[in-house]
């Protein structure tokens, strides 16, 4: 991708392309996205887009990795309360369904197996350390920290925009979201939290 433009006009054009392309890629994927639609909606031209991003794939990369950082960082983990983290992830999917769709297109069109991105780009080291520390403290069930994280994320996405069962929207009644949050919170708590009373019993034997 080309360097960020320096002029205010160029920066505004650059940002318009990104804003339009997020919706275009989220709706149509990488193969289905059309540069013609992007430049028309962004009030620019193909030459400008290619000068900034190199190609349609380069534009997707700029959007996807920017979105990946937002997904990772906008919902800080509390490994001592993974149930609450799952609920906050649920709320983020309601606020930004386009980000989840982008990740899904990347999975379908680029990385059908394994990690979604290369190891240097994963950005989950801090979360994994937090889960491992909570496990060492006897708060979270044992298991590979990555698998624990993956399970909690999967549970939080039960009603996400890419669910193959039911995709929730922010326009639904608040009480419906509260029901789901309560179920999600209880389910993650039961699945991932160590029962402290049993843990005490074991230590006393």
Image (cartoon, rainbow, N blue to C red):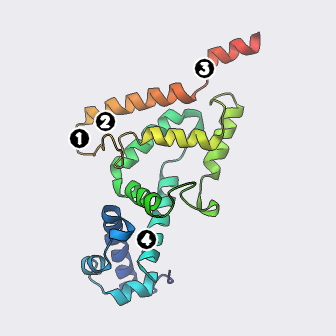
First reached walking from the N terminus: tag 2 or tag 4? 4
User: What's the CA distance linking mark 3 and mark 4?
Assistant: 44 Å
User: Callout 3 environment at 10 Å: few (<14), some (14 to 19), or many (20+)?
Assistant: some
* The image quarter in which residue 166 lies: top left
> If you read the primary sequence from the N terminus, does the residue marked by circle 2 or circle 1 appear first?
1
Which labelled disc corresponds to residue 177? 2
Q: Residue at x 47, y 54 (%)?
A: 71
Q: First in sequence: mark 3 or mark 4?
A: 4
Does label 3 or label 1 sit earlier along the sequence? 1
Q: Does 91 sit left or right of 176 as displayed?
A: right
Residue 55 occupies quadrant: bottom left
- SS for callout 2: helix
| Residue 5 position (above or below residue 17) | below
Asked if the residue at tag 1 contacts the one at tag 3, i.e. Cβ–Cβ closer than 8 Å, the answer is no
- Residue 159 horizontal/vertical position (percent): 35, 41
- Mark 4 crowdedness (10 Å alpha carbons): few <14, some 14-19, many ≥20: many
Q: Name the residue under label 4.
A: 60
Q: Is mark 1 on a helix, strand or loop?
A: loop
Mark 1 lies on residue: 172
Q: Where is residue 193 in the image (x, y as percent from the top left)?
A: 58, 27
Which residue occupies the extreme front position in the image? 112
Classify mark 4: helix, strand or loop. Answer: helix
Residue occupying image coordinates x 34% and y 53%: 97
Kindly identify which numbered label has been placed on residue 195: 3
Q: Nearer the viewer, mark 3 or mark 4?
A: 4
């Amino acid at each position: 991708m080309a360097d960020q433009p320096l002029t205010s006009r160029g920066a505004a054009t650059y940002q318009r392309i990104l804003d339009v392309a997020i919706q275009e890629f989220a709706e149509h994927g990488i193969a289905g996205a059309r540069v013609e639609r992007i430049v028309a909606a962004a009030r620019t031209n193909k030459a400008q887009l290619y000068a900034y991003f190199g190609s349609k794939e380069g534009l997707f990369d700029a959007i996807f990795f920017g979105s990946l950082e937002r997904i990772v960082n906008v919902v800080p983990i509390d490994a001592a309360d993974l149930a609450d983290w799952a609920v906050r992830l649920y709320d983020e999917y309601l606020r930004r369904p386009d980000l989840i769709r982008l990740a899904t297109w990347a999975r379908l069109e680029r990385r059908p197996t394994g990690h979604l991105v290369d190891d240097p780009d994963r950005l989950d080291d801090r979360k994994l350390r937090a889960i491992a520390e909570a496990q060492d403290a006897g708060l979270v069930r044992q298991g590979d920290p990555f698998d624990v994280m993956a399970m909690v994320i999967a549970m939080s996405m039960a009603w996400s925009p890419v669910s193959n069962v039911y995709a929730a929207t922010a326009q639904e009644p608040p009480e419906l979201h509260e029901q789901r949050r309560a179920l999600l919170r209880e389910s993650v708590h039961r699945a991932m939290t160590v029962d402290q009373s049993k843990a005490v019993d074991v230590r006393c034997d």
